[in-house]
Amino acid sequence: MRDGAPTTRAARTSVLIGLGLLAALWAIPLISEAAVEGPCDGSATIDGITYTPANDSPSNPIVIPDKEGLVAEWEGSTENPITNYKGSISVVVGPTSVKIADWSGSNYQEITSQQGSYDLDEIDMIPPGLWEVHAEHSGEGGTCSGNVMVRVEGNPLSQLPGQIAAGGTILALIGLVLAGKA
Amino acid sequence: MRGRPILGALSGLFLGLCVAVLLQQYGIRPLDNLSVIGFPTIGIILGLLMAKLAPFGSKS
């Protein structure tokens, strides 16, 4: 054992501690939230695959393929009419969320189910990756909320966020190495 | 502390954020609380440890 072994051991220990913390963090399971809370249900068919609120984990997300001209056929229902409603969809980013759509209305016809289609080319500005999407719909008659995972397929390095993150990772690693020099 | 703690902390913070974005972009983990807060925190700790234990491999 060399004279410098204690420092080297300490350095190795610190790196191991860091990797251990990282592994512990990684091992914390992504808690799958209750699919939908409230008297609502729905589904969407994209590229021949039907998704439900059960697609709420990173291993079982709603997949939006990197193709043009895709249309999502969707349907939604409530157990009882929800009138004077309002709702929104937002993307979860850490402790906050970014609203991407909202709606409101009276539903004076007291409709309990609806269906339609959505042109997925309209969301091609969303970078590829795994997104946690939160939706809620509330009014007189009930309140519904739920989270799903959505994976937008595509090459991350072809988009600015991915390029910045990749370049930033290299720069940050260089900075860490320089921080460890006297 | 013979290293550069400020550089280490900033680099660790930036590394954690970049790793969180890369994992999200590659569809591995969403930008949840653990990614957005946990990875940068670990990065800062790593950076400070690097600075505290610098220079690596030197005789003490």
Image: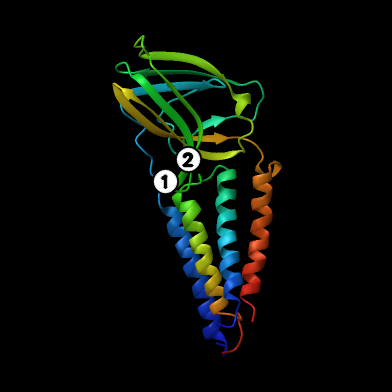
The chain holding disc 2 is A
Dot label at residue A58 = 2
Crowdedness near tag 1: few (<14), some (14–19) or many (≥20) residues, C-alpha within 10 Å: some
- Displayed quadrant of residue A79: top left
Residue A33 spot, x, y in % from top left: 37, 38
Q: How many marks?
A: 2
Q: Quadrant of the C terminus of chain A?
A: bottom right
Q: Is residue A174 above or below residue A182?
A: above
Query: Residue drawn at (49%, 62%), measured in percent from left and top?
Result: B41
Looking at the rendered structure, the secondary structure element under dot 2 is: loop
Q: Quadrant of the N terminus of chain A?
A: bottom right
Front residue of A72 and A18:
A72
Identify the residue under disc 1. A30
Res A105 visible: yes
Q: Amino acid at mark 1?
A: Leu
The chain holding disc 1 is A
- Residue B34 vs residue A118: left or right? left
